[in-house]
Amino acid sequence: MWHNVPVKATAGSGEATHRNRLPREERIEQVLRAAMIEFARTGYFGTAVETIAERAGISQPYIFKLFGSKSALFSRVVDESFDSLTSAMMAASEGLTGTPSLIAMGNKYKESLRDNPAVLVQLHAIAACSDQRIRSVVDKAFGRQWNAIAERSGANNVQMKVFVGLGRLLSDVAAIAGTTGGRGWKSAVRAPIPAGLYEMLEMSAEPTVR
């Protein structure tokens, strides 16, 4: 996962050497990892490209050369944040369908919330949807995640709303609780969901919207 890869370098005199050593795609990945961390901390509007450049160990103009704009960089990070979590859930539910797949994906998502900047990036992305380009990226990324979960599980619309809604609630609590873990209502939110809940919701015959 992205949050397990440390990114910190020093820009300046060693930058030219660093550029020559890393192929373009590896440099892009390096910037994306740094951007994931910084955007998770201070969001789209509060993060300066200069800060990302400093963490990645390259110059600010070089980031613009690679991505074109701050909006394009953030959009790429948003895509990565959604797709990485979706991939983790798909891996965890391989070979499963129905309620067992939802349980496996839900457990993996809950596990992924700990110290994961991708989760915070998603919250910041939704907050930045006043920007039309970002709103479009979030719309498509959320849609891909929704469709992947629905196709793997065969869940109907009601089951999907409950599953995704509970996931977003856990994301919110993870952001609020931070490293403290949370007590009181925050602890209550983490209570396990009985498998029977999704089976009860099978009464809805409405097909899943994709």
Image (cartoon, rainbow, N blue to C red):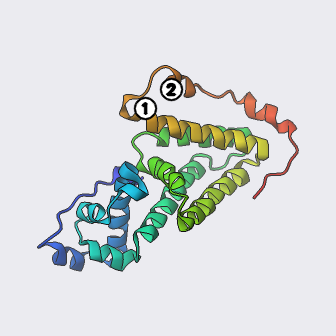
Cα distance in 3D space between marks 1 and 2: 7 Å
Secondary structure beneath dot 1 equals helix
Specify whether 73 is left or right of 156: left
Vertical relation: 83 (above or below) 26: above
Badges 1 and 2: C-beta atoms under 8 Å apart? Answer: yes
Q: Which mark is residue 177?
A: 1
Q: Position of residue 72 (x, y in %)?
A: 45, 71
Q: Which is more toward the observer, 73 or 193? A: 73
Q: Which mark is residue 186?
A: 2
- Residue farthest toward the front in the current orientation of the protein: 130
**Percent position of residue 9, x then y:** 20, 62
Residue at 72% over, 47% down: 153
Q: Residue at x 44, y 26 (%)?
A: 182
- Nearer to me, 44 or 33: 44
Q: Residue, x 42% and y 58% (percent of image)?
A: 44
Q: What's the residue at 61%, 56% (across, down)?
A: 142
Amino acid residing under circle 1: Ala
